[in-house]
Image (cartoon, coloured by chain):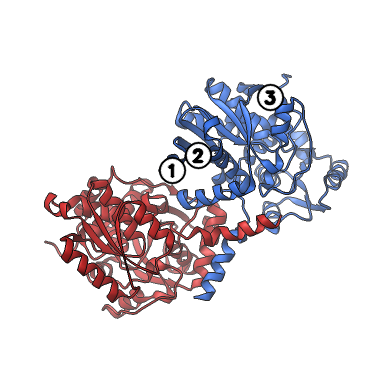
Chain colours: A blue, B red
Amino acid sequence: MANEPTFEDILQAYGRINSYIHKTHVLTSRSLDQLCSANIFFKCENFQKTGSFKIRGVTNAVLMLSPQEAAKGVATHSSGNHAAALAFAARMRGIKAYIVMPRSAPPVKREAVIGYGAEVFFSEPTMEAREEGLKKILEKTGAVPIHPFDDFRIISGQGSAALELCESVGKLDAVLAPVGGGGLLSGTAIAVSGTSPGTKIFGVEPTAADDAARSFRAGRIIRGTYPHTIADGLRTNIGSLTFPIIQQRVTNILTVPEEEIIEAIRLVLERMKVVIEPSAAVAFAVLVRHRSKIPGKKIGIIFSGGNIDTSLLINRLRTSCSKQ
Amino acid sequence: MANEPTFEDILQAYGRINSYIHKTHVLTSRSLDQLCSANIFFKCENFQKTGSFKIRGVTNAVLMLSPQEAAKGVATHSSGNHAAALAFAARMRGIKAYIVMPRSAPPVKREAVIGYGAEVFFSEPTMEAREEGLKKILEKTGAVPIHPFDDFRIISGQGSAALELCESVGKLDAVLAPVGGGGLLSGTAIAVSGTSPGTKIFGVEPTAADDAARSFRAGRIIRGTYPHTIADGLRTNIGSLTFPIIQQRVTNILTVPEEEIIEAIRLVLERMKVVIEPSAAVAFAVLVRHRSKIPGKKIGIIFSGGNIDTSLLINRLRTSCSKQ
């Protein structure tokens, strides 16, 4: 087995999953182009099934299970998009999904996972408790654990978003993708290198969760805990399988402060009329802040997801309405 | 001159404007389809230039001006999408736009109009003051007044959104469009009757601004003032040119209460990841409430615009972030 997925693996993953997922729109915005002096192509994985790119990797992993493995079901611990995606993909194959969720997960995320038919087990919110919970389930059920990023099947599936982007818009000067565990960024890097060799690849991260940027500079994985970023999808540490791929293929990892992430959400809501989650906004925020470090005019941005708690967006509207 | 625009007028308007506007996406949503037991096709005029369908009608009107008329510029009074659209279309033709705006117009709307290069005059927020302001400007400048809806050129341009919708998705059982002054609804009715004769056409309105519904039932225009709906685009009374078209071609006008308009915005934000303004949400809210009155499975909805004050959506997010 190669020590990283190949471009061929991504093509195969795409062939495997492509009838189960949306080929998402690529949107453009004249006014955001002006703001950045660039032609930006936004790959809208926020419109993807389950609201994020995560469905690509787990669909690939679930479809690659042997019938014997599939019969036992799949399991993971996650509070977010990976949980919803795995529950959805398992239902699609007609197998069981066991999900350990921290009690602190937002009700809307719990409901989504339960709505997709997964069996949910609540744990204390620490990583130890989540891993302990998962271990017990694996022992009891024999289910196959599906890691959110440190898994070649997952990385290959995630790479298919960039594959579609490059196919739709042709040669790009640069592509920006967020990095939490690194599944999306490493898959994107392999896909873009394969389709469009000269294109630069940038990882993006909140300054408040900059473990990937620091690891990239240090040349070794530096772990930490980062509860304070609004970009909940990017609190995770970089993975041991994803990191070497990123080291080898990514041009740089750039960071932005929290207020610029919110400003990016606002600009995208106002100018594009599109809802993105904070993790997805980081790439556009980075482009605004670090425009001079990103070469060329034609730039791809992966809007990784749109699962923001809508009560954060809508409550003010209700108040304003009841006052009228 | 015919007493209403013909289908041919709409085709001509579309030919005239189509290189100046976006052919907007038609989006679908599995989960909203399930909620309504329907296949819904959302025509996303919220993604249109200036953020609403209004650019279609004014572009048609501005392009139809003779060189002599154009040299004097165009003028209107409006606090909303019509003002922004007229300013944009005038700049596109390289002519002056004079806009009377009520002092009460939201800063974000003022800035958009000024940003498009229009000359803005502020008036008291009453209809009398707005009309008086416009009259003075017309006397002084000789500019051509462009009415927001009671104008055949405007109606013909607005109809082009439904034309694109019908072209993209084929025969629909029903189409729903909001009705304020009636430009969009009357244009939609002519376009849909021409392309797809059996399709039912529904107007939709807030219960808190139901002058079109009451006029439709009474068979004559009933005027009123409706400051209390959140759907600011639909506070206008139905027009004297648009009403007869609506009477003749529209199946029914259905209404919804305010809280269901907000719930529709929430559902569209959460499930489709798309931002719509309250006026645009009314059609989906009506579909949810009055599903049994709307025949068939294949239903088109015109998302008329996306210009919602983003501070209403984003402030809670800022608060939540600063607390972390």
Q: Position of residue B19 (x, y in %)?
A: 28, 42
Under tag 2, what secondary structure?
A: strand
Callout 1 environment at 10 Å: few (<14), some (14 to 19), or many (20+)? Answer: some
Q: Amino acid at mark 3?
A: Gln
Q: Which residue is under mark 1?
A: A29
Under tag 3, what secondary structure?
A: helix
Q: Amino acid at mark 1?
A: Ser
Return the disc, 3 or 1, that comes first in the chain's sequence.
1
Q: Which residue is under mark 2?
A: A42
Q: Is residue A236 above or below residue A173?
A: below
Q: Which circle marks residue B98 in the picture?
A: none
Point out the frontmost of discs 3 and 2: 3
Return the disc, 1 or 2, that comes first in the chain's sequence.
1
Callout 2 environment at 10 Å: few (<14), some (14 to 19), or many (20+)? Answer: many
Lateral position of residue A86 relative to residue B188, left or right: right
At x 41%, y 42%, the residue is A30
Residues behind callouts 3 and 1 on a single chain: yes
Pinpoint the chain carrying mark 2: A
